Image: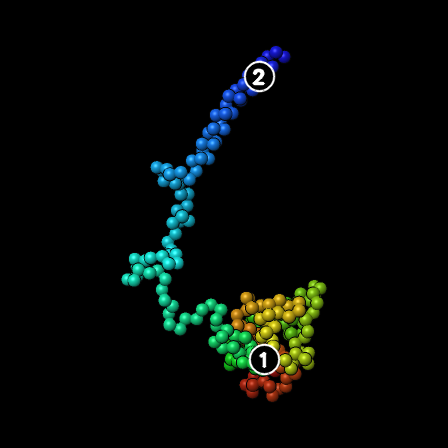
Amino acid sequence: MSGIKHSHSFALNCLFRVAPVLIVAALLSGCSRGMPKEKPPIHLNLNMDFQNKYLPQESSKFFKDGMTMRMPVPGTVAWGDTAFLNTPYFLGVDSRDSAIAKIPIPVDMKLLERGQERFDIFCAPCHGRTGDGQGIVVKRGMLPPPSYHDPRLLKVKDGYIFNVITHGLRNMPSYAHQIPVQDRWAIISYVRALQRSQDASLKDIPEEMRDKVK
């Protein structure tokens, strides 16, 4: 037992002697932070510390005027200002802020095919492939959206549908970030084609394609 006590007291004695040295070393190392040093700092990733880029207002040896920032190309439009160039196209409303009646761009087969593609991606999961409001999400419990073939929606203006796609309505979120303006009009053209298909006659089909209809 005396040997154990002797070892314990020896360890404590060493600890008391070493502790002040460790404390002083820690304080000195903390004080040295931010102090001038003769050796350069160590850069573990040079690409992050020294990036090949210009900062705003920085000088440049590449251009004769010594300026990094350049004047915009004539006709340049600032991001977000395009809506003021053509209000019906970008907002779906006229000068009186009323929804426009018809799509403000030519409707052709290319636009319809693009609209079908985008519709199947963004709209069909809820609205169904035929626009009946019975998409796969609805079959899994979501409240069904109204059918595009509802008499009320048959009469709404194209600008109204554009506004719903842009801003959302009730359970439907905004798709402004997912669907560009051109694609919104393409989807609307396809929605109108779906609506027309439910009440179409043989006269609505081009003559060269009528023989394919059984």
Q: Residue at x 66, y 67 (%)?
A: 171
Q: Residue at x 60, y 77 (%)?
A: 160
Q: Amino acid at mark 2?
A: Ser
Q: Amino acid at mark 1?
A: Ser
Q: Is residue 110 left or right of residue 70?
A: right
* Label at residue 9: 2
User: Within the image, what quadrant is residue 168 found in?
Assistant: bottom right
**Image location of residue 197, percent across then percent down:** 63, 80
Near mark 2 (Cα within 10 A), the count class, few <14, some 14-19 or many ≥20, is few
Q: Is residue 185 left or right of residue 59?
A: right
**Image location of residue 128, percent across then percent down:** 65, 71
**Image location of residue 69, percent across then percent down:** 36, 62
Foreground pick, 197 / 187: 187
Name above or below for residue 1 compared with residue 175. Answer: above
Mark 1 in CB contact with mark 2 (< 8 angstroms): no
* Label at residue 98: 1
Near mark 1 (Cα within 10 A), the count class, few <14, some 14-19 or many ≥20, is few
Placement of the C terminus among the 4 image quadrants: bottom right
Foreground pick, 162 / 208: 162
